[in-house]
Amino acid sequence: MSRPSMFVAVPMMALVLTNWVRAEHAKISLEVATAREQVTAFVDQTPPEWGKNPRPVLKAKVNEPIRINYLLTNVYPHKTLENVVVHFFIAPQKKVGQKELPDLKGDIVMETAFDMDFKPGGKAGQRSTLKITTPGVYLVRIETGKTQSDHEHFAAIDLVVTEEKPEK
């Protein structure tokens, strides 16, 4: 191997090996929509709890139908992930982009959780439509737990619900 091609080959091999060793176990998509707009968030990871990517923001009106759809997939080609917790919630938070997760012991809009074994390519999802009756900023989040990994995955969207302005 010539010296110039070696300078290219060695970093390329390191990049491929790094990505192979750090293979991810989950693919997540989260869609939140109103009749006017839709936003989608894709997989992020902890730590830190708030992830590495900024969250998309969706604006809605009080009592407006909000459609939520998520899909979580095990992307390991040959490994079953056993007893994975899938946790979904919508909870009030203080501001858009808030780093601290909201307190789930107080008032929450919606919360579901279940555990399951994810075979290679296994999927879990949920579709819901709801109305929020109180203006505010909310965190919509789907997350994994207990994956026997050094990190967990999630997708999240900030939802800003405002009062409907009367027409003049």
Image (spheres, helix red, strand yellow):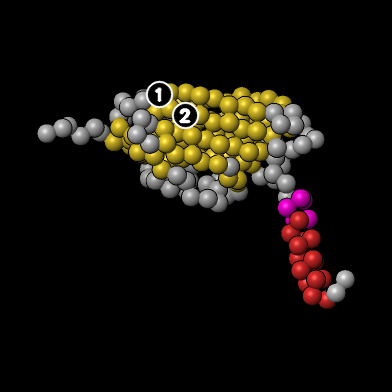
Secondary structure mostly taken by the magenta-highlighted segment of the chain: helix
Of 151 and 8, the residue lying toward us: 8
Residue 73: x percent and y percent?
A: 65, 33
| Rendered image quadrant of residue 8 | bottom right
Label pair 1/2, CB-CB below 8 angstroms: yes
Residue 59: x percent and y percent?
A: 35, 38
| Rendered image quadrant of residue 36 | top left
Q: Specify whether 131 is left or right of 166.
A: right
Secondary structure beneath dot 2 equals strand
Which residue reaches farthest left? 168
Which amino acid type is shown beneath numbered disc 2?
A: Ile
Visible residue check, residue 43: yes
Task: Give the residue number, with chain letter if any, for mark 1.
Answer: 130
Q: Residue at x 78, y 34 (%)?
A: 79
Quadrant location, the N terminus: bottom right
Task: Give the residue number, with chain letter if any, for mark 2.
Answer: 68
Residue 63: x percent and y percent?
A: 31, 25
Q: Residue at x 77, y 37 (%)?
A: 77
Residue 68: x percent and y percent?
A: 47, 29
Q: Specify whether 17 is left or right of 30.
A: right
Q: Compared with residue 63, is residue 30 higher up or lower down, i.e. above or below?
A: below
Of 91 and 56, the residue lying toward us: 56
- Going from N to C along the chain, the mark reached first, 1 or 2, is 2
Q: Specify whether residue 136 is painted magenta.
A: no
**Range of residues picked out in magenta:** 17-21
Visible residue check, residue 105: no
Give the spatial CA distance, label 1 vs label 2: 8 Å
